[in-house]
Image: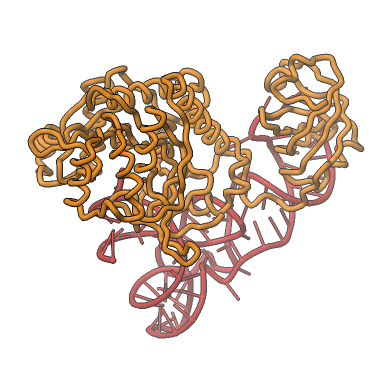
Amino acid sequence: MRILSRDLLAHKGEQVTIEGWLHKKRLLGGLTFINVRDRSGLTQVVIKNKDEVEKLRGMQIGSVLKIDGMVTEEPRAPGGVELHDVTVAVEVPVTEEPPIEIDKPLSHKPENLDTLFEQRVIGLRNLQETKIFKIRSEILRYIREFLYAQDFTEINTPKLVAGAAEGGAEVFKLDYFGKEATLAQSPQLYKQIMVGVFERVFEIAPAFRAELSATTRHVSEVTMLDVEMGFIQGHGDVLNLLQDLVYNVMTRLYGEHGDELKSLNAPELALKPDFPRYSMAEIHQMYQKATGKDMSQEIDLTPDEEKWICEYAKKNDGCEAVFATDLPESKMKFYHMKGENGTARSADLLFRGIEISTVPQREHRHENLVEQMKAAGVDPDAPGFAPYVTAFKHGLPAHGGFGFGIDRLTEKAIGLGNVKEAILFPRDINRLAP
RNA sequence: GGGCUCGUGGUGUAGAGGCCUAACACGCCUCCCUGUCACGGAGGAGAUCGCCGGUUCAAAUCCGGUCGGGCCCGCCA
């Protein structure tokens, strides 16, 4: 039976078998140390027998090994335990040296990201890289656990769709058996439809954006968390849900993975259960007062303002997550609900200097929705929209929700500098492989 | 789409008109080494300095073009 690295201590004094990848060799003459990597970590193996060492000659990092040996407690060994008197079997020999180092942290400097992604297949075996994606996996788990506990149902909606799901973002067009189809830029319409079935739904899935953006925060395939909740009493219910979700996930992450985050140079977490809320107009004013720059004519917050308000909230409110509320009506999508005085019932959640979510209440009244669609130049009878409108005709309660960039959250949770670093195989305007 | 930048062994960097027959670290190969954990030591292989053209007695270095990256803005999440 195969024993994992993390379970070795429980088998001390026993003869066991481990399997894994050759991660590191250190030859000291009469004594050889190797590290074997499995899904749970590294095992140190001590080899004294010359014949066994000889089996590893020419074997490069990545060779798959099966090793029998005696589990021995040893204070000098990392983890306090190592394998002695071993028999080595090379299951998959690797003779080519890795194209990128896997036992020392890789360069994440902007100018070196191209190499990082070009060599991703092997580079992800680097323990530091692996850690990033282990944390991402945990974030997804915490999100799911939080939402299940709130009685949400996880759904999957089509990614091949008939038309643009919402205004704004550019879409990828493709040939669908002779018809034109697009890759879904958001599950927006479907998740609202599903409120009529489950009340509370969420989806974690890719969304495709064809924007010609080349920045540290854009990719053309993003992983989105989409949440939609029915029977809300007001916009505040949705804000609170998002706030509780982020607070819960982030405090859990920092609580359970503090060491890993520290080793990745993640910043300390500063969060309050109640995130500060400032209206867009207030932020423009505060920013102007602080910097002298007038952004009041901007529809949205500029990237600089997003950074500024996050730093402000961290300093003054002790919280690095902050809501920008009362977004202007001009930024409103047809499915959003109007607010007071030219605003929409919509807010952005900013965290560590970047927008990670937009959280609006929806227009759930059939007549109003159709009106808003027409005003936005969207045909309610078009094949991409008619089924959506039908759901409203047959009764949708007051509802709201949010879309939430998993990549950006992971990036910011760890303190990386580019979303792409938080994506296994990022897709951007000039990368389609690996 | 606009602006600004950068391309040097497999990887990360130094060199900024002649000291370059291109240096260093990691990795790789050979040898030595019984407690390493970024092991150490000795030796070695590996780059026509992205590509094309120009200036010059002389170009990795200056200029133009081209290809490929990166960052910012716009757009967007």
The x, y position of residue A131, in whole percent, is 55, 33
Percent across and percent down for residue A393 are 28, 39
Q: Position of residue A151 (x, y in %)?
A: 43, 21
**One can see residue A354 in this view:** no
Q: Is residue A416 above or below residue A70?
A: below
B63 or A222: nearer the eye? A222
Task: Using the image as rendered, state which of residue A389 and residue B51 is in the foreground.
Answer: A389
**Residue A159 is at least partly visible in this image:** yes
Q: Quadrant of the N terminus of chain A?
A: top right
Q: Nearer the viewer, residue A37 or B56?
A: A37
Colour of chain A in the rendered structure image: orange
In-image side of A2 versus A172 (left or right) = right
Q: Is residue A228 above or below residue B64?
A: above
Quarter of the image where one finds residue A390: top left
Q: Which chain is red?
A: B
Query: Which quarter of the figure is the C terminus of chain A placed in?
Result: bottom right
- Residue located 83% across and 27% down the image: A17
Q: Is residue A323 above or below residue A428?
A: above
